Image (cartoon, helix red, strand yellow):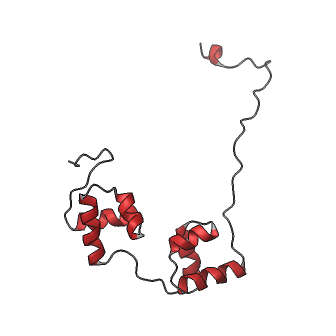
Amino acid sequence: MLLQKLPDPSAPAAPPVDRPKTRRARQLDAVQTQALIDGYLKGATTYELGARFGVNRRTIGNILRRNGVQMRRRGLSPEQVDEAIHLYELGWSLARVGEHLNVDHVTVLIRLRERGVRTRDTHGRPRS
C-alpha cells in the first residue's frame, strides 16, 4: 500500500522549486549612518528616516542606539491619547489613528486599553 504512494524511482526527478533568493538586510555605509543620525537629531522621526533610507523603523532605532544617540520620548502624551480615543470612537481604525499620530497601531491599542476603551474586531464589532 505505501509503495504505491511513492514515486516511480525510474521516473526523472521533478524540476527544482523556483524559490526567491534570500535577501541580506540593507547595510548603511558610514556616510548614510551619519546622515541618519543628523536627521534624527534635527527632528526627523524613525518612520521618516526609515522611508528615506529604505529600512525598517526598528532598524533605524537599532542604528541610533548602537551609535549612542539618545532616543526621544516614545509613545503618546495624555493629550494625544485623548485625541486617539476621540478618533477611534469616530470609527477610525487603530492603524489610521496610529498613522495620524505617527506611532504604531499597537501603541494606540495599548493606550486605549489602559483607559478602558472597548476595542472593535477587524469587522468593526465590539470585542467580547
User: Residue 91 versus residue 69: which sits nearer the camera?
Assistant: 91
Q: Position of residue 39 (x, y in %)?
A: 58, 82
Q: Left or right: where does residue 95 sit relative to residue 7?
A: left
Q: Residue at x 42, y 64 (%)?
A: 99
In the rendered image, the residue lying farthest to the front is 90
User: Residue 103 versus residue 113: which sits nearer the camera?
Assistant: 103
Q: Toward which corner of the image does residue 52 lie, by quadrant?
A: bottom right
Q: Position of residue 46 (x, y in %)?
A: 52, 74
Q: Position of residue 113 (x, y in %)?
A: 24, 63
Q: Left or right: where does residue 4 sit relative to residue 117?
A: right
Q: Left or right: where does residue 3 sit relative to residue 90?
A: right
Q: Toward which corner of the image does residue 97 lie, by quadrant?
A: bottom left
Q: Is residue 52 above or below residue 124?
A: below
Q: Residue at x 52, y 79 (%)?
A: 44
User: Residue 57 versus residue 18: which sits nearer the camera?
Assistant: 57
Q: Is residue 104 above or below residue 121?
A: below
Q: Residue at x 28, y 47 (%)?
A: 124
Q: Is residue 11 above or below residue 87?
A: above
Q: Position of residue 51 (x, y in %)?
A: 58, 67
Q: Toward which corner of the image does residue 27 lie, by quadrant?
A: bottom right
Q: Quadrant of the N terminus?
A: top right
Q: Residue at x 38, y 64 (%)?
A: 98
For the image, the number of numbered tags is 0
Q: Left or right: where does residue 119 sit relative to residue 75?
A: left
